[in-house]
Amino acid sequence: MNMGSARRRLFASTMIGGLALTAAFAAQPAAAQTSSAAVAKPANDVEEVVVTGSRIHQAATDTPAPVETVTQQDMTDRGFFTAGQALNDLTSMVPAQPLSTGPGVASGTGQTFPNLFNLGAGRTLTLVDGRRYVSSATPVTGGGSGAGSGVDTNLVPVGLIDHVDVVQAGGAAVYGSDAIAGVVNYVLKQNFQGVEMDAQSSITSRNDYPENSIRVTAGHNFFDGKGNVALDVEWSKSDPLSNDSRPTSDLSRSTSGTTQILNSRFYEFSTNGVIFSIPAPTPACGGANCFLRLNGVPQQFSADGSSLIAYNPGVNPTTGGTALIPPFATGGDGFPLKDLSGLVSGVERWSANLLTHYDVTDHMKLSGSLLFGSTRGDDPQGSQGFSQTILNTPASGAGYLTFTKANPFLNAAEIASLTAASPSFGAGAPLFLSKDFVDLLPSQDFITTTDSYRFLVALDGDFNRFNRDFYYSLSYTYGQVNSKQQGWAVNNANFKNAINATTNAAGQIVCAINKVSLVDPSCAPINPFGSNTASSGAGTYVSVPVGYSYENQQDDFLASLGGDIFDVPAGKLKFSVAYEHRVESQDFNPAAANLLGLTGSGVPTPATSGRYYTNEYSGELLLPVLGEGFNLPGFKTVELSAQYRFVDNSIAGTEDVWGLGLRWEVVPGFSLRASRSRNFRAPTLYQLFAPTSTALAGGVQDPCDSRFVNAGTNPAVRAQNCLALFTANPLFGTGSAGTAPVGASAAARLAGFQDTAVNFSTALVTSGGNQTLQNEVSDTTTYGFVFQPKWVPGRLTVVADYISVDLQNGLTSFTPTNFSQACFDAPGANGATCGFFTRDSVGNIATAVSTTYNAASLRYKGETIDATYSFPVEWIVSADKLGNIELALEATHNETLKQTVQGVVTELVDTVGTTGLPEPRWQVRGDVRYIRGPLRVTYEAFYLPSALAVPGANTANNAQPFIDSNLRQDISASYDFGRIQVRAGVHNFTDEMPSYPTLSYGDIIGRQYFVGLKARY
């Protein structure tokens, strides 16, 4: 063995150990962030191209700002068939999944949007070949800092994707609004030839969640290679999952303060119907709950509605006793919390992409594309049933039902039992029924369908004038998204008719309105007693389609001119100027039932529309200071870049944004880079023009409620402000069962206060758009290095960058909870957010507002690191032609993500949160790939460290304050036989579930086997 071989083997084994150990034990403070394709381009590649992040044609070398690249090969190696799956695998992205984040939380529309650094999906701009794509964000996903103008990754066809560039932080000076966290640019293939067919199928080890995909891609050159046409058509489908399909979600877990509640059930109602003597959910009957009791035992109706049976309400999760406090008990016969929502929404997608271009001359190219995408998202429990319970008032549209012995669906035995339990019932007094109707609606599903169309025509060319090379581009893009969400709800008026049953002269049970004469022939009476006892006719009569439809349209004209200005000693001073005119419009139309206010709280939802246009002027300069033989020791190449953009938005006004960049190649194989930029995001049409409506609502987490007064990011200030409020209002915290009496101290009243708006629909909430919104603006700084030493055996690349984003005037979705908590978490509780809610005479939140607000500032700091190393196996094993090994480490270190509202600072880093948007301090992915000719084997490990459940969590205020680390591991292999390529693999082969008790901090799907086939002709 010669010394050179020994040295290479020693170095290779050292690199294997270092990268593999770092990937496996990523909790150690290493570096952060990579993709196998995220290596800098070879230094000797001088072909001038358009790189993501600039419109100047330049050598495809390193850029001043960090750019991550995912290739088609990366997707194939990992068994990904959607763009979203590939983006989720980047450590700088927050994984986007159609997933419920907890019991009772809807699994959603099925849409997924890129979200860099957890700054909000609306702050990541999506492009296709450097041009904008019409937003597919729905009114559900498009508010606040959510999806904004985002593009659903399911709508992007992958068959003609060459690679995906992800610019990390900034980009607005080149591309305009929304490029704050960064840019996702799908770069398409330009000269695809032949036919390629691809199919993949997968199933989990639990024999559920099948995923199937089929794709056909075809292309052909014509006119001696002057033109090309390519078509890609693809389909994929995944089924929904219910909460009982996975161990953690099946627990039906909730919390009350520091108490964990398993098998959480609403003791206030069941599907059979729970009977109450007084419609009060609290222990208002002599310290006990007001169940109708027969021989001391609470009663409900039997499943068939023919008799009374014992009702087990469960036990108090805090005391273990029988006095129950809303909304949950542990165990019993109540309605399971987990049944309020599905776990994962099913998604079916169709897409097609037609690309063509023709070289009119050697210096002019005409191109066009037509892209179509269609998705269908299925939230299996979107309607959450139809409940009429004591948790709500009758005015809310979800209140309890009153019944007497005159109800014709009661038999004699039931009347006798009810009278024995409540003698006044036998005399005609009412009792109260609390239940969830599972038999009225034709389906619990909410279906969201989205169709996206994008048409592009472009003329690109180049010419020479004054001994200078110039190039130009003219393009027009039209995009349109049509989306519709439809589910089912109960028509209030028809339900009122149907529930009011009586007998006619013939002794038939009919709707009371039809007792004497046939007023409404469609009305079928509802039997409210038991489960699944309503007739199909009754269900048809009361059910009505609900939902909405919307249309987004985008017209975009873009013209650019670039080229060389003059020669400088180190090369050519290059420029690019551009003009962009864009028109955005949106029409929102609620379903007829929503428009008329026929369901729920009875509040109409108006139709709305909006439109704006923008004129934008931009320019760039690229100045080589040193290079091409004009250099100094330690300064092989120095390039400076500058960008400027002026934006004139017809609604949001004007904005000036800019960018500066530096690339400094110190010596061959080692470069430094830095950038500084100012970026912005304009308010979206839905944020501006969302329809205004007012309705009773619950779920308001009042910071002065005794369950939350010691929580939050500033618990001492919150408690002090609430005590001052109760001191100034001597009736606050009195007036209902379990509260302090009038005259009690402020501290005593605060200690027992529970706001009714937390669990009941008692707050009158006005929601809608905000036409006073302004642009949000950020200042971004990045700096880092690229290390590609040629003296290291094999191929080693290390790329590291520091990223800082300071955002002001942030467009933030504020709910009543956000407004009230921002108010009381700030010293003095007298800020602007305190004016968005009021209280009633005993302290409950009575009115509130939900809207988008220029309220928050965000400050992000972090680092990303990519390291790749490849070498031949023969360096380790004494044999020839055994292939190559590639090692890769990608990590993102989130140093800080601070949100400031009214001076109150919340640190989000090192927390998991409750909305499915975790912000761990580290995210690390390690890859090991073996390549030998047509064989490729890939191992991947994705690591998330331990973190806090929510900001400020501790054992004094949270039932599970600390969330464990999580490690997902995948393995896959492919073999290329020439025309046929086969692949197979296992995602999450250790079946690692998300860290308890979360549903999203890890992989909820579990172990999943896949097999795929690709045929080329």
Image (cartoon, helix red, strand yellow):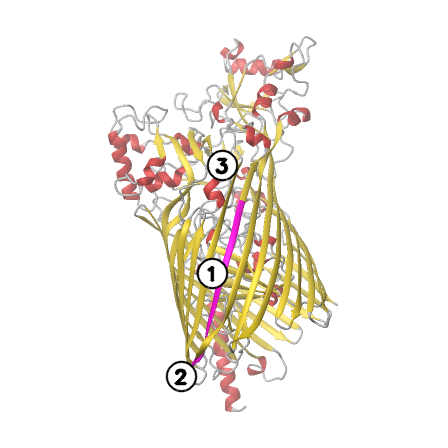
Extreme residue in the right direction: 1017
Count residues near mark 2 (Cα–Cα under 10 Å), then give few for <14, some for 14-19, many for 20+: some
Of the pair 823 and 157, the residue shown nearer to us: 157
Element assignment for label 1: loop
Q: Main secondary structure of the magenta part?
A: strand
**The disc labelled 3 sits on which kind of residue?**
Pro
Disc 1 versus disc 3: nearer the observer: 3
Asked if residue 835 is positioned above or below residue 12 in the image, the reply reads above
**Among the 4 quarters of the image, the one containing residue 195:** bottom right
Q: Is residue 553 magenta?
A: no
Element assignment for label 2: loop
Asked if residue 858 is positioned above or below residue 771 in the image, the reply reads below
Asked if residue 931 is positioned above or below residue 721 in the image, the reply reads below
Q: Position of residue 298 (x, y in %)?
A: 50, 23
Extreme residue in the bottom direction: 2
- Marks 1 and 3 in Cβ contact (< 8 Å): no
Count residues near mark 3 (Cα–Cα under 10 Å), then give few for <14, some for 14-19, many for 20+: many
**The disc labelled 2 sits on which kind of residue?**
Asn
State which quarter of the image contains the C terminus: bottom right
Disc 2 versus disc 1: nearer the observer: 2
Circle 1 sits on which residue?
Answer: 92
Circle 3 sits on which residue?
Answer: 691
Circle 2 sits on which residue?
Answer: 631
